[in-house]
Structures are given as C-alpha cells and as structure tokens.
C-alpha cells in the first residue's frame, strides 16, 4: 500500500532541514564552481585553440562540462554514501524497520526535498548566470530541453539506486573502503561526468557502454549538446529506463537481504 | 485479556569467530567459523491489557533482544510471540501501528529540525487525524510542558526535554502498547520524577499496556506492580514486586574509606563482603540496623575518611536471588 502523503511529508521536512544548513549549501556551491573552473580550463588547454576535436566543437565540449557540473550538483545534494553507511553502522536504518513505511522510498523522497532546496536556492541562480555570460551552446529546440530533463531525472534515479545499494552493502561488510573506491571511480569516470565517452579508448568505451553509470551524466549531457540526437535520443532514454529498472531491482534485493539479516542476526 | 503472549521464546545469534595472528587472518578470509550465542533461551510470559510490567535484568540478559522481537525487528529462533493478536515479525508494519517505542539511548526525532516538525512527520506516518493530533498534542503539552521547546531544534534540547518529546512522539498514534527501554537513563531526579508521573498517568487514564526495562530500582518500585526478572536469557522471577522488594530491597551497602587498616574491621550487624586497599564494602539490613549505627561502630576503632550508602542494584538483587532462591516465598511464580 503506497501512502503518498507520508513520503511527501518526508520530502517537505527534508527541504526544511536543508534550510537549516545554509553554510553547507554555500560550501557545496563553492566547490562546485571550483570544479567547474578546473575542468573548464583543462578542456580549454586540451583543445589548445582548436575549433574541434573528435568531431565535437569546443563550444559543445564546454557546454558538456557546464551541464555535467550542474548535474553533479543535483546528484550531490542527496544523502551521500557515507551518511547511508553511518546510518547502517549506528543501526538507525534498522530501527526504521519498525515504522509503517518503506525505508528506501523514504530516503528517496527525503532526497527529493533536499535536492529541490539546493536547486532552487543555489544551482538554478548560479547556472542561469553562467549560461547567460558564458559562451555555451543552449539547445534551441524546446523538445531537446524536455528530453534533457527526462534523461536527467532518470539519471538521478539510477544514481540513487546505485548509491543506496552501495551504502546498504555496509550491512554485510566490516570495512567498506574498497566499495567506496569502486563507487567513486565509477561515478566520476565511467559515468562520463568529466570526460565524454567518445574520448575513451575503445576498450574502456565498450565497458562504459555496458554499464549503468553512463545513464547518470553521459546521456543527459550528450542530449543537451545535441551529440545524441534524433532517434538516438529515444534509444538512449530506453537504455536509461532499462538500467533504472535493473538498479532498482538490485536495490530491492540488497534491501530485502539486509533487512532479513537485521531481523535474523540483529544487525 | 492477554495483550502480549510470549511462549518459549528463543533467539540465537551467530557471531563470526575472529582468529588471532596472521595465519588466523588468512584462514578467516577463506573460511569463517561461527559461534552461536543464545541471547534468549526460553522465556514465556503473558501480559494483560492495561498492565504495567517491569522487564528487568542485568546488561546482556536479553531484555533488548526480547523487546526487539516484540516490535518485530528481530525474528525469533524459536517459540511464539503475539502482540495484540499480531505476530510482529510477520506483519511488522501492522504491528508498528499498535506499539509505541522509546529507547532512552537514542531518539526517534529528527535531529536538525524544530521538535514540532518531528511530531508533524509522525502524524503523517501513522495517519493520525487532525482532531486527534490536536487533542493529543494539547494533552502532552499540558502534562509534559512541551511548549517550552516545541520550536527548538532537537539537537539543542536537554536530555530531559528530549526524553519528554520522545515519549510524546511514541504516543501520538494512540498505541495500545508502549515499550519503554530505559526511559529515565541519565536524567536528573526532577526529570525522572516527571517522567514517572507521566507514565503512571497514561497507563491509568488511557489504559495503555506498558513494558518497561530499566536499571533504576526506583522506576520499578514506583511504576510497576509486577516484574519479570531475566538473566542469561532465562526467566528468574515473575510476580509481584513487593515480594522482591520486601525480601531484597532492605539490603543496603555502605562503602567506607578508612584512614589506616592496622586492625581488621569487625562489625556486629554488617557483613564486609569486599575490601580493596582502605576501602570496605559493608552489607547490612536496613530493618535490623541503621547506617548511622554501623558508622558509629566503625568510628570507635577507625577513622573514616569518606563514606557512601548504595541502594541495591538490580545486579546484586539478581545475584542474591540466585544465592538464596525463592523457595521460601509462598508466592508462586506466575506464568
């Protein structure tokens, strides 16, 4: 039984909670800008005055990075991996088992709240200014915007399922350093967040294409700059949908195993 | 009518055995051995609607494990549990609506937000109607004085305030059953008293069944008529509190620090059961002799540097029950 109001309340309260941590919002925004400048200059240097590389114009590449940083901000505003791990270690998550709601969904809706707060108060104002003053290529077709938003939302859900699954693995492991490394490596490189997949060596590109991470950044970014266009947009979103289903099922499996372990083993 | 039924309840935990040394570490990478720990061995009891029962035992006796099985977050390894007609672990979410839980050691409130926000969240979680929510809040504000800090973030509350908020939060959805796990731990005397008054009141006025675990003898004496005493996962005693109190509650311990220990301490009415350097632990029966009489006796031969009188602790009562047993008591063990 899905009780919509419970989850909606989680989103609302989480929105309010973010407002308490204003400094956190500013510091995130600061580091987001620093990374944007860093990747912007790296790509400027790599293009070295050339108009085009790998069939992609410098302007499009710069846009790719800006959009990517925007999405990084969005995805980073949810419950971070370490916090999920912490909740598992302290047993807080296990205690939520005795409440009449679904735990993974409750965290997803709480994330919606904090992400909404961060987007409205920080990301949107900043990136609106950036798009106005920077030399970036905005989609002219409104349909592209729609596809981009859809792809970004699905990407967010994929990221959520993956991050939550990794976090819940803490139930089964004494130490999670290795797990964290894999997660952050995949999130930064394999997702195409800083280097688009078309610049990957073939073998790595092949690996990345068969993994869910590209759905988080690479697909929405590429739709935005028009590198994925036409019919390809629909197949890309299809791939994303496939991965969101798969990662959701994995999350469900891990969660049911984890809660079973808690109730049998005492966490 | 029994509202909680527990029959031959058991719970084992498998704990991975850690082996020492490098070879052990390598071995455990491949094959891990497990030790089975029986947290709850065989416990049975029933609790009637409206009863207030102290569930008592030393640390590690299996109290929290039992409570967790009653709330449904642990599955028993054996035996049966029924809470308000529901098997908790089979229908955790349904069971959740019938119970309120307070853990003295942790909070169920949202840490960063004003206290009122947590109440509003719980209102939605348990789908409490607007009118009922208002009524309950009015009552809790009245008795617990919540209005002092409703708009203060939970992290800034004192422990006493936080506990008051926590117990109110656990009762917002009118559960017929309330589990209190050490609700007065760490509170000062005034706050403890306030807590106890509140618990008594809701038990009487709302006929809420209360199960209380605590290490504070005062809590049990003031709140419960009946106690279930467990140790090492087994029931040691189940019956009226007055029996235990009359029998063991009279015993006090006097701890004295003496200046020198040339002579050994000889007492008429007290028993020295432990000594360490110049510190002596003396057990005496409050009804046979007063603390001041014993102190007088000591000062005749020794100089006292410091002294304290200790109330009997659960642990010492349990060990005395073990030593002396309950055979002489006519009250039969309830089941």
Image: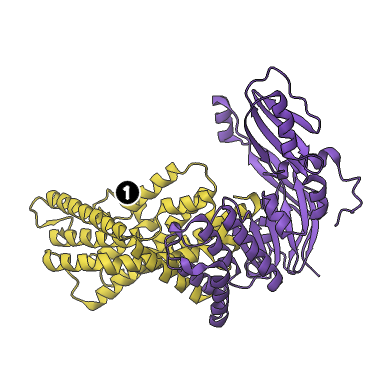
The answer to whether residue A257 is left or right of residue A22 is right
Q: Is residue A87 visible?
A: yes
Q: Position of residue B333 (x, y in %)?
A: 87, 53
Q: In the rendered image, which quarter contains the N terminus of chain B?
A: bottom right
Let me know if residue B76 appears in the view.
no
- Which residue is depicted at the point 70% across and 69% down? B208
The residue beneath circle 1 is A204
The colour one sees for chain A in the rendered image is yellow
Residue A3 % position (x, y): 53, 75
Across and down, in percent, residue A151 comes to 33, 68
* Above or below, comparing residue B286 to residue A263 in the picture: above
What's the image's color scheme?
by chain
Is B16 displayed left or right of A155 in the figure?
A: right
List x then y, in percent, for residue A77: 34, 60
Instruction: Indicate left or right for A99 with A234 as reference.
Output: right
Look at 28% across and 56% down and name the residue there. A28
Q: Between B315 and B44, which is closer to the camera in this rendering?
A: B315
Corner quadrant of residue B207: bottom right
Q: Quadrant of the C terminus of chain B?
A: bottom right
- Which residue is nearer to you in this view: B254 or A146? B254
Q: Chain of mark 1?
A: A
Residue farthest toward the top in the current orientation of the protein = B262
Considering depth in this image, is B151 or B307 the residue closer to the camera? Answer: B307
Query: Chain B drawn in what color?
Result: purple
Report which quarter residue A119 is drawn in: bottom left
> Residue placed at 81% from the left, 42% from the top?
B321
Residue lying at the far bottom of the rendered structure = B131
Q: Secondary structure at mark 1?
A: helix
Name the residue rendered at 90%, 54% in the picture.
Answer: B332
């Amino acid at each position: 039984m899905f009780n919509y109001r419970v989850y909606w309340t989680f989103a609302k309260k989480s929105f309010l909670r973010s407002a308490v941590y204003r400094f956190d919002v500013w510091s995130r925004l600061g580091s987001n800008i620093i990374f944007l400048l860093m990747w912007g200059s790296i790509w400027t240097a790599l293009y070295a005055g050339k108009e085009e590389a790998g069939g992609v114009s410098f302007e499009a590449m710069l846009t790719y990075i800006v959009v990517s940083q925007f999405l990084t901000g969005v995805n980073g505003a949810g419950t971070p991996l370490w916090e999920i791990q912490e909740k598992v270690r302290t047993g807080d998550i296990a205690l939520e088992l005795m409440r009449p709601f679904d735990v993974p969904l409750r965290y997803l809706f709480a994330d919606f709240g904090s992400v909404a707060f961060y987007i409205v108060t920080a990301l949107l104002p900043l990136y609106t200014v950036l798009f106005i003053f920077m030399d970036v290529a905005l989609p002219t077709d409104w349909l592209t915007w729609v596809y981009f938003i859809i792809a970004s939302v699905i990407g967010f859900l994929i990221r959520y399922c993956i991050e939550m699954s990794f976090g819940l693995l803490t139930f089964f492991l004494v130490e999670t350093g290795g797990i964290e490394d894999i997660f952050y490596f995949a999130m930064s490189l394999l997702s195409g967040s800083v280097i688009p997949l078309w610049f990957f060596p073939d073998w790595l590109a092949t690996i990345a294409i068969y993994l869910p991470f590209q759905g988080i950044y690479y697909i929405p970014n590429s739709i935005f700059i028009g590198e994925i266009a036409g019919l390809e947009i629909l197949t890309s979103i299809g791939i994303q949908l496939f991965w969101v289903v798969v990662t959701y099922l994995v999350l469900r499996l891990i969660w049911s195993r984890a809660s079973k372990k808690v109730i049998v083993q005492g966490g | 009518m029994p509202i909680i039924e527990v029959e031959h309840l058991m719970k084992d935990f498998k704990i991975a055995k850690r082996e020492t040394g490098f070879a052990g570490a390598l071995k455990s990478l491949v094959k891990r051995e497990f030790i089975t720990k029986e947290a709850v061995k065989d416990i049975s009891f029933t609790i009637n609607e409206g009863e207030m029962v102290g569930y008592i035992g030393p640390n590690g006796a299996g109290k929290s494990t039992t409570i967790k099985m009653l709330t449904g977050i642990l599955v028993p390894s054996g035996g049966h549990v029924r809470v308000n007609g529901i098997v908790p672990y089979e229908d955790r979410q349904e069971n959740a609506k019938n119970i309120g839980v307070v853990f003295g050691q942790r909070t169920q409130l949202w840490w960063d937000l004003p206290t009122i926000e947590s109440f509003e969240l719980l209102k939605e979680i348990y789908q409490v109607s607007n009118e009922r929510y208002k009524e309950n809040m009015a009552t809790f504000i009245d008795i617990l004085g919540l209005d002092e800090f409703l708009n203060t973030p939970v992290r800034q509350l004192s422990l006493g305030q936080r506990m008051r908020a926590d117990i109110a939060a656990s009762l917002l959805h009118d559960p017929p059953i309330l589990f209190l796990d050490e609700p007065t731990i760490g509170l000062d005397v005034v706050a403890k008293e306030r807590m106890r008054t509140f618990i008594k009141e809701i038990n009487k006025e709302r006929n809420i069944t209360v199960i209380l675990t605590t290490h504070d003898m005062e809590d049990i004496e003031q709140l419960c008529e009946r106690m279930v005493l467990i140790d090492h996962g087994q029931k040691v005693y189940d019956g009226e509190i007055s029996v235990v109190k009359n029998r063991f509650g009279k015993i006090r311990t006097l701890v004295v620090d003496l200046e020198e220990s040339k002579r050994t301490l000889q007492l008429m009415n007290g028993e020295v059961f432990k000594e360490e350097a110049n510190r002596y632990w003396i057990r005496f029966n409050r009804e046979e002799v007063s603390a001041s009489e014993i102190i007088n006796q000591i000062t005749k031969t020794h100089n006292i540097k410091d002294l304290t009188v200790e109330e009997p602790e659960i642990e010492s009562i349990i060990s005395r029950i073990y030593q002396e047993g309950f055979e002489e008591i006519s009250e039969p063990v309830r089941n």
